[in-house]
Image: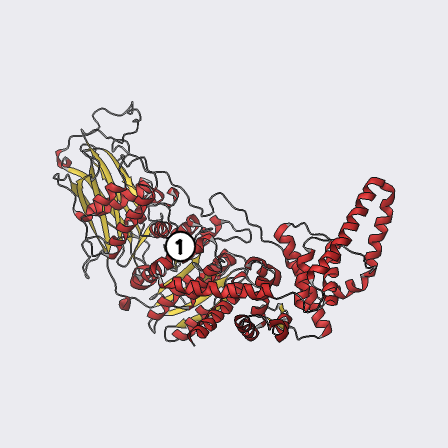
Amino acid sequence: MNKPETEFPYQDDIRRYACRTTGNWADAEDVVQETALRFLKSPPALEGNDLRNFLYRIARNYLIDMFRRKKLAKIKKDAEGNAILPALTDDRLADPAQLAEKNEDAQQVMKLVQTLPPQAREVLRLRYFENLKTRDIAEITGMSYGYVRKLLCLTLGQLAERMGGTQNG
Amino acid sequence: MDENTRELMILYALDELDAEERAYAEARIRQNPELEKEVERFRQADDLLARTAQDTPPLPTLMTKKRRKSLAYRLIRDVVAVGVVVGVLGMFLLPATKYARESAKMVFSQREFDMALCEAPCEALVCEERAVPNDPNGYTPSRENTFQSPKTAPFSTFGVDVDTASYTLMRSYLEQYPQLPPPESVRVEEYVNYFDYDLPQPGKEDACPFTSSVEVGKHPWIPGLYMAKIGLQGRKIDFAELPPLNLVFLIDVSGSMDTLNKLPLVQEALTGLVEQLRPQDRVALVTYCGDVQVRLNPTPGTLKGRILGKIRELRADGSTNGSGGIDVAYELARKNFDSEAINRVVLCSDGDFNVGTYDIAQLEQSIEKYAKTGTFLTVLGFGMGNYKDNRMESLADHGNGSFAYIDTAGEARRVLGTELAGTMAVIAKDVKIQIEFNPALVSEYRLIGYENRVLRAEDFHDDRKDAGEIGAGHRVVALYEIVPVGVENPLKTPPADAPRYAATSETPETSDFSNELFFVKLRWKKPDSDTSDYRDFPVAAPELKPASPDFRFAAGVALFAEILRQSEYTNGASFATVEDLISGSDSKDEKRAEFRDLVKKAREIKP
């Protein structure tokens, strides 16, 4: 435990994000340290949301790099050439032990989520797990604002359809 | 429910719309209450996702975030404590902490090396800085025309204006916000010219492509005064009879277009137009944002599917470089130039050209140059927020073109559907009107509106001076308030001194003209000509009869606009007066019925 603890703003957010994305503590802590290092080395003249997005972006880039090195998953690129994070969260969420006590709806949701394209899953994760606004998501992922909104619409549209389906059937 | 509406409703349910879009969405829901149910469904889906996320811990391991956090807090607390001690003990400890930081760096140097290897686009996070002016919509206020005396200013000269953008903008303010439009956004003539009037149609064989008619009557709301209505009606042409179209659409796909009442509406408008295309028509698509792209080379109307596909593919992103796009579009139009065809660049934008060192005067100059070669410009304005009204209008003016503001799918259908022939086909260009008032009968006169179209008297005969165009089926109506000799003007501003050196007997009592109230002179050019045609006719002093319902309606529209722009010359008239004026007119006319509703809305906002 002699690791030097470095402090930076939004540390908890970044840690949570890293945990959810990597699914394990060791890697998550790696991401946090890396983000800290990067931040302390040349603190950007940003504050508030901009700073948080900047940090998320560093973390995300590092995550991509990490996945690339570990070959945990093939990195896909979207139309604009940006890397898309593999959606590890979903596998874990689909874990029956995790969902045993959740209602059927939640399981339905997760089934649906797994059928979505990876970009949509990342947008979903950032919105619902990280509570980020659409503009921030666009800024962090490098996707365009309109595209993020499109993906949100895609997900919500499908989900609403499913829910309607279960109610009727 | 189509795709666009569905997305709009989803984003509305998620509360992901900005104020402007939300107003637009709410207007849609008001029109179609069924949508409310859809919104509710999307809200439930959103809620379900949020709940699921809440119920899921960040890690499947036993070590929860909370525990970890407390560990972190303990560490933080310690660090803070140490920091305090450092502060108290003074400067001699500083080298030590510095050393600690250095060593921390060394621990991570290997990782740093790895980071350098991956080309992560961290640094791409540069926020686009944009100066926000006080009035982001950028309206150019124009000074109102004042009362003039025919003794000092016998000529009133102006160029025609058939645009209707200002009216549509007012409509979207009233229907979507609802609030009154900003006074400086009101151009009275554009309100008046939005409507059809009972004007004589030109015959097929007539040399002049439009008819002119004058009606003089009692001033509808100021007793004692006259009002004159001068109307020009352009020849109607069916779309099928139009010459072939050679259109280049220049579409702004910059980030600022990325709201639901901009690009999707552009797509809808263009789709409506493409569906009408004939085999001889050609359409090309150019988009611009950071860079300019030719999305579709000129494609004949037989390949509708291909054109529609390209329209559907449009996405908004990036920043704007408006001027470069215009050059490319004109170049494309020039390459396919056909002297028999209607050659047009159609610019669809919110007018926010925000990148590069553009000079608006320069841009206007080059557009004017292109217009001289026979390629005209149509400007379609979209959205609000950073909608640049003045810029769009001045571009259209310099490009011998028309300018329309598209606020709804309905307006898109009107401009590019039912009135497409008028939007596309110019029947007369550089149309100028000059009125000479007879000082023997008129003590003062005032032109209502046309402030930014007023020309100097000597410009009338100067064919080099540019003026407005009349499209097929377009009409131009101008209203004058006239104070007859011997009547006190209730709106009178203190008069200028009478000219000291003016000859006292300057008004010759020539009985020849004694019954002429004013004299109308018109100049216009055929679309392909550089020299103008001329026509004139005198207008006799009227028998005092009340204005016709059509006249009263036009006056009512003008008064409505005058009230909205907070004119000094309304003589205390209110929206109630407007309602009274327009009540007698044809109730079957859709536009007029809609106007009646708008007046009612305005009255609710500001009784």
Q: Quick check: B513 above or below B21?
A: above
Which element type, helix, strand or loop, lies under badge 1?
loop
Which residue shows up at 22% across the image and 24% down it?
A: B504
Task: Please identify the quarter of the rendering in which residue B571 is found.
Answer: top left
Residue B110 is left or right of residue B178, and the answer is right
Quarter containing the C terminus of chain A: bottom left
> Can you give x and y, in whole percent of width and height, for residue B570 in the image?
28, 37
- Identify which residue, B158 or A30, lies in the foreground: A30
Which residue shows up at 29% across the image and 23% down it?
A: B501
Determine the residue located farthest toward the front in the rendered image.
A101
- Identify which residue, B514 or B184, lies in the foreground: B184
Kind of residue at badge 1: Gly
Determine the residue located farthest toward the top in the rendered image.
B500
- Identify which residue, A39 or B313, lies in the foreground: A39
Q: What chain letter is assigned to the residue under label 1?
A: B
Q: Quick check: B197 above or below A141?
A: above
